[in-house]
Structures are given as structure tokens and as C-alpha cells.
Image (cartoon, rainbow, N blue to C red):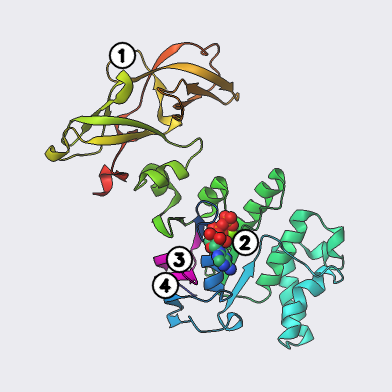
Amino acid sequence: MAGLKLTNVAKSYGDVSVLKDINLDIDAGELIVFVGPSGCGKSTLLRMIAGLEKITGGELQIDGQVVNDVPPAQRGIAMVFQSYALYPHMTVRDNMAFALKLAKMSKAEIDTAVNKAADILQLTPYLDRLPKALSGGQRQRVAIGRCIVRDPKVFLFDEPLSNLDAALRVATRLEIAQLKESMPDRTMIYVTHDQVEAMTLASRIVVLANKGISQVGTPLELYEKPQNEFVAQFIGSPAMNLFPGEIVETGEHTKVRLDGGHGIVQSAYPSKAGDMGARVNVGIRPEDLQLTDETVESYSGKVDVQENLGEVTLLFFVPDSEGMEPVIAKLPGIHRGLKGQTLNLAAAPEKVHVFLDGISLLYR
Ligand SMILES: Nc1ncnc2c1ncn2[C@@H]1O[C@H](COP(=O)(O)OP(=O)(O)OP(=O)(O)O)[C@@H](O)[C@H]1O
Ligand SMILES: [Mg+2]
């Protein structure tokens, strides 16, 4: 069992700061997912945990021990990379056994470890094949197998599925979920760009942005109660709509008059008397908007583009001014002929987020 503790961890390359003030406790057995925009430092953080990249500030503990200066091989960690780089001239069995041979384990021990890993990953029929005779998904499983045989306390995955096609991604994602279930006491840290992978695999998601952690929480915490506009718009697809407006009623519930003459919306989020008149952004997810006959307490807009996906209909509304993002509504089922119509939309108060200076009213 190994938990990790990051205290004020920082990384800079020369004068260029890439990450700072990273504070994070990861419990043993968790599957933590790092997400964030390209270049925000996800791989760098993972490589620092692996010991492949020097930590330039703060402290990293694994299993209660400070490991800042412990070499990678002694950290009890194994890492799966995006490009899985198997040895092309070695069979699947030899690829998986390689690290164990280097560690001078006995043939019997190596066979046991490789056979067990192959069994978990359903690679047994392929053990004597060369990598070129495998599909992309099978190769990726061999790469994971190379980690499993070493029986690490912590697994690190850096976008392990990004080279796979869509169908294979779904299948391999399920395999990783099952792999985690079969090893409940192993800790996994997983980097991905893929929303669905993050939402489905994670015990908790860490959203990285602006050199630091923007929010940490379970997938549904981040979806239902984002702390700030960045997380609100990063988690969920299409992204949460943001409507600029002004607070016109404060208290346990808050009312905001939307700019552009769209009407008033009510939020279940509380505000203080001093917030009266404050400029805010109201956040409503596309799937939380519903058509309504209500004309005062609603957003009113003209449908610019309609996309019929069968299970849902996406409506894109004409923006109030050029350059603004269009408001998007995601209605369940099929709706015909809405393009060009002016419609009123509303959301249940508990689905109406309010951000003051970019921070949700729930988190003040
Ligand atoms: N050796 C280096 N020298 C200077 N800057 C670097 C070096 N390696 C990475 N960086 C910078 O550190 C930042 C974080 O890079 P990193 O690879 O961790 O991002 P990432 O979040 O994994 O991005 P992606 O999603 O594109 O994989 C980037 O701005 C990158 O340019
Ligand atoms: Mg990366």
C-alpha cells in the first residue's frame, strides 16, 4: 500500500516556472486522474513522481518517505507512456520479462510473474508473438504488462490510450478499470486529455491550470460543483455556458439579470447583501437548459444552428455580439425545425452556477 503526499512541489526549467505550490494527498489504492490544457505540466508532474525529472521545490513523499532524491528504480513505481516503445525483436514474453531479467530474478520467478500478468491482461495467447504481429490495443496491454510484472506500488500512466482508435480506446479503458479493480491496493495516477476517461476511471480528478491545481474532487463533484469558471468550462462537453449579468436579488437564493435583455435567472447559490449589483457570470450546462414558455425569468435567443444527433439535439444561439461564444442547449431526443426560431430557455435554480470574480458563490 502506498499513498503519495506532495507538499509545495514546484518545477522550473532555469528561470521558467512550469509548476508551483502543488499540494496533494493521494490515498493508497486511489486512481487519480490529472487533466488540464496542453502544456499545463501534467507529464512533468508525472515524471517528477516517477523520478525522471528533478523536483526543483517542495517535497514528494511515497509511502511516508521523502523520495525527492531517490532514483526512479527505488521508488516502487512503474510508468506506461503514450508511445509504448516495445522491443521489436523480442516476443511479448521477453518484452514483459526484460526488466525482471535485468533485476536478475530467477527463471521460475520471472515465468510466474509474466504468466500472471498475461492472464490479467488476456495476453496469454500472444506470449510468443513479436509486437509487429499485435494490434495497437494488444501492444498497449503488453506495455502495461511490463509494469505489472514488476509489481509496483504505484502505476503511472501518461495518456496510455491516445494512440488507439476510438473503439479500441473504449475497450482498453474498460480493461484499465478492471485492472484497477483486480489490484485494489495499488495506487494509479493517470494523465489524459479525454473527458470520458477522466470521468469514468477516476476516484478523484485533479484539474491542473496556471501552473497549479485548479480543483481536486470526485468526477461528480467537479461536474456538479466546480469551484471556478475554468473547471466549470473544462469539465463537461459541450462546455458550460457563461452568461454575463448583474445580481439583482441577494439572499439564500440569488437572482441575476442577464445582459442583452435576456431576462432574469434564479440560482440556488447564496449571496450576501453586499453582492447587490455585482457583475457576475451565470454558468449553466447545455444539458441543464430547458425550453420554457416563461418570458421574464429566462434566456431568450434565436437558434442559429441546429444539430440533430438522434439521442440529443444541440441548439446554437445567435451570440449577442460578434466574437462571443454562442449559447448552446442540449435537448434530449429529436426536435425538428427549431432553426431560426426565437426560444426561451430556463434551468432549475440548483443547476444555475454563479461566478463572482471567476469563483463560484458556493466556495466563498
Ligand atoms: N526540458 C524542458 N525545458 C523547458 N521547458 C520545458 C521542458 N519540458 C517541458 N517544458 C515545458 O513545461 C510545460 C509543461 O509541459 P508538459 O509536457 O508537462 O505539459 P503537458 O500538460 O503534459 O502537455 P500535453 O497535454 O501537451 O502533453 C510546457 O510549457 C513545456 O513547454
Ligand atoms: Mg503530456
Q: Nearer the viewer, residue 19 or 164?
A: 19
The numbered disc on residue 217 is: none
Earlier residue among tags 1 and 4: 4
Q: Is residue 165 above or below residue 240?
A: below
Q: Tell me where residue 281 appears, x and y as whole percent.
A: 32, 35
Does the magenta segment cover residue 99? no
Does the magenta segment cover residue 19? yes
Q: Tell me where residue 200 appears, x and y as whole percent.
A: 53, 49
The alpha-carbon separation of the residues under discs 1 and 4 comes to 52 Å
The alpha-carbon separation of the residues under discs 4 and 3 comes to 21 Å
Residue mark closest to the camera, 3 vs 1: 3
Earlier residue among tags 2 and 4: 4
Residue mark closest to the camera, 1 vs 2: 1
Mark 4: few, some, or many residues within 10 Å (few <14, many ≥20)?
A: many
The numbered disc on residue 17 is: 3
Q: Residue at x 86, y 65 (%)?
A: 130
The alpha-carbon separation of the residues under discs 3 and 1 comes to 50 Å
Residue linked to disc 1: 295
| Tag 1–tag 4 contact (CB < 8 Å) | no
Give the side of residue 343 with respect to residue 332, left or right: left
Residue linked to disc 2: 179
Q: Residue at x 52, y 76 (%)?
A: 54
Of helix, strand and loop, which one carries label 3?
A: strand
| Tag 1–tag 2 contact (CB < 8 Å) | no
At label 3, the amino acid type is Ser
Report the magenta residues as a range: 5-32
The alpha-carbon separation of the residues under discs 2 and 3 comes to 36 Å
| Tag 3–tag 1 contact (CB < 8 Å) | no
Residue linked to disc 4: 5
At label 4, the amino acid type is Lys
